Amino acid sequence: MSIRNPRLPCLPGYGTNPLLGKTRFGVRPVFTSIDGINMLVDKAEEGNRVPSLYCRKQAPDLPTWLMYDKNILTFQAYFQQSLHEMKVGSSILRKVTILFFLEDGTLKVVEPKTENSGLSQGTLISRQRIRLPFSYDLYYDVLDLNVGLEVTLYGKVFKIVNCDNFTRVFLNRLGINVPDPLPYPDAIEIAPDTRKPPKHRPFKQFLDFDRQVLRFYGYWDDRDSEFGVLHLMEIHYFLADDTIEIKEVMPPNSGMEAGPMFLKRMRLPKKIPPRIEMTGGPRLPAYGPADLSIGAVVNAFGRNVVLTDCDPYTKEYYRATYGLDVFTPLPIPGDEKECVSTSTADRQLPPWNGYGSYEDSAQNCRTVEPKAPHGDFMKFLHKDKVGYDSHVLRFAARLITDNPEDARRYFIIKYFLCDDTLGVFELSERNSGFQGGKFFRRTKMYLPDVDFFVPKEPPAYTDQDMWVGNELDINKHKFRLVAADEYALRYLEVNQYPMANIALIMDKIRRTLASVENGYKNFVAKYMDAVLPDKKDLMSVKCFKQALKEIMCEKMTEHEFITIIRHFRGDPGIEKNPRREMIRSLVFTDLTRGLWDDRDRLREGLMHSDEVGTGVLSPHRLRQLLRAHRLPLNGDLMDCMLSVLKKDNNCNILYEDLMEFLDFKTRPVFNLTEEDYQKVVRHAPPVKDTECKLWADMDTLIHDGYVNWSAFLCQLNLDHLVKEPAPIAQA
């Protein structure tokens, strides 16, 4: 393009071209903002550009994802987490950052990571929209977040204490007043130990005190032990590195051969802790020059070495360093003490030091060559698992705590009779926040408030402490036994434990009623009307328990009450086992789907297998016969069915009860959902520790139903207290 000169004619060759000789032809970029968006234009426009479709200042607002892109409100908050395994406090303070994204109204909670904190830190709640508590259509918004407010996010309560400058300005522009920052409360906060130990310069000490050794003379009196003698010692203290070595000096013609060194060169600690940690940490306080003097006693790992004298260099060192002038040697005791005779009396063992078990430590003290400790083999032989007799007592337990979250937790406590050990397992519940499984490993559980570091093993929980209603203090956790399985109840009753001995319980009730004037008469008269009108021998369990509590008050435990109910159970056909009926309904559902109805052939096969005619078969043999007759049942459902059938004392199954169980004429009417099926069969194996619902059903069976009132009064045998004395005949 050329620029025309008006003074020249408009002919070719009379114009000038300004681009001649120019090498750069770039366009200068001009940026302008149109509707809040930065754009590149040829030239800057004057004024704000608005669409022609709308009037000026009447254009629609931009979307939030564009208007508030990368605009985030930042709040500082905290929440308290309860800790039951820490002795220093019951909770810790965890500081978090709450991020609110303005573009889509999402929330994110992040906890700064702390090195060696032992906690899972980082992103606690990923970015998402969170509903308000007890609401299904309302979500957290800008108005719900401010300094001083508490927000509940998935069950955790966060207290907001501060915000950044952008958040404060943004909320102020919206007309929201933001309070001043709040201080964090005083709570235990897990943080790494940043304290540094005092700097030690061993090389300087080595240069100053190399080849300078303090020499002491002393003895170790071991004559109180069997075949013990008086040992003469020579103690060397090296000033270069604060180490000690002890050498035994043998008298001439003693007939004994000395070892290379009684104590090798090392830093000798003043006090040996119960358990020496080998993973580092602060150095234990050791003996120094200030702790050594004539008459001092050095504890060399349990051997008390008495210092009696020192050499001239040592005396000069203490005279120049500590200003001591008196170095009177102590006499060495003679042989006036007699050695302990070789008797078979029990020796006093040293206190337990924390290594291994009590039996293992005792073996190391009794013999020179340690041997593995042997438990009670006869008890193991008689109380180990034999067939279906497991010799394991299973109890359901609850935590005794004021925390409502921990009060809902469910535990199974197993007591192993073969070695008197306890194992605690937790039953997991969906969305409870607690992971089930092993809670305390199987070991001996000692009684609370006992001294562990003693020569003899402290008392531990025994099978006498396992009864329903008892409270166990296990590792600072208090459990209450709330139920027991059928095997545990039956075992305690057969072996006549105090809480399951019906004779002792009835004698206690009998003595209580006899001690009160007209006590038995009033007791019978008051509760005679509570007997069922159609069946005069039966009384409800609820009324029966109320009657016993009225006369016994607090003298009767929950396990004793369960024992009486089981012994005087009246009309057991009235109430049915809900688990048995539920499993029976599942079995009939699968039998109907598989078109199976061959009970006669199954009965013939069962009677053919029972050659002796005892009426019982082992569970293994019965499972084989059911498979042979093609019952369309899976393995889990078949195990559930076999677990609810009647058994004899040897855990063999009565196959007549099986035929009654499979009788189509008495088919149960149970409307089970898929969720119930999962609970009974797949998610609750019949003999595992995940039968939380079934424990509750068993507890319901005990506290519901009826008691044989007539049999109870007959066994009390207190009718002589009711009879009036005969009148005396007058002369």
Image: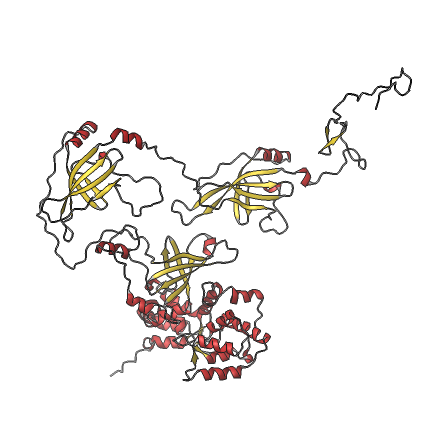
Residue 529: name its quadrant: bottom left
Left or right of residue 127, residue 641 in this image = left
Residue 115: name its quadrant: top left
| Image coordinates for residue 381, horizontal then vertical, percent | 31, 68
Q: From the viewer's perspective, is residue 181 above or below residue 682?
A: above
Q: Residue furthest top?
A: 7
Looking at the rendered structure, the number of numbered marks drawn on it comes to: 0
Q: Nearer the viewer, residue 457 or 130?
A: 457
| Image coordinates for residue 721, horizontal then vertical, percent | 32, 75
| Image coordinates for residue 94, horizontal then vertical, percent | 48, 42
* Image quarter hosting the N terminus: top right
Residue drawn where x is 22% and y is 32% of the image: 211
Q: How is the image coloured?
A: secondary structure
* Image quarter hosting the C terminus: bottom left
Residue drawn where x is 11% and y is 41% of the image: 332
| Image coordinates for residue 58, horizontal then vertical, percent | 77, 36
Q: Nearer the viewer, residue 708 or 478?
A: 478
Q: Nearer the viewer, residue 96 or 5?
A: 5
Q: Nearer the viewer, residue 543 or 336?
A: 336
Query: Residue 493: in sight, yes or no?
Result: yes
Residue 212: name its quadrant: top left
Residue drawn where x is 56% and y is 41% of the image: 98
Query: Residue 533: in sight, yes or no?
Result: no
Q: From the viewer's perspective, is residue 318 above or below residue 649?
A: above
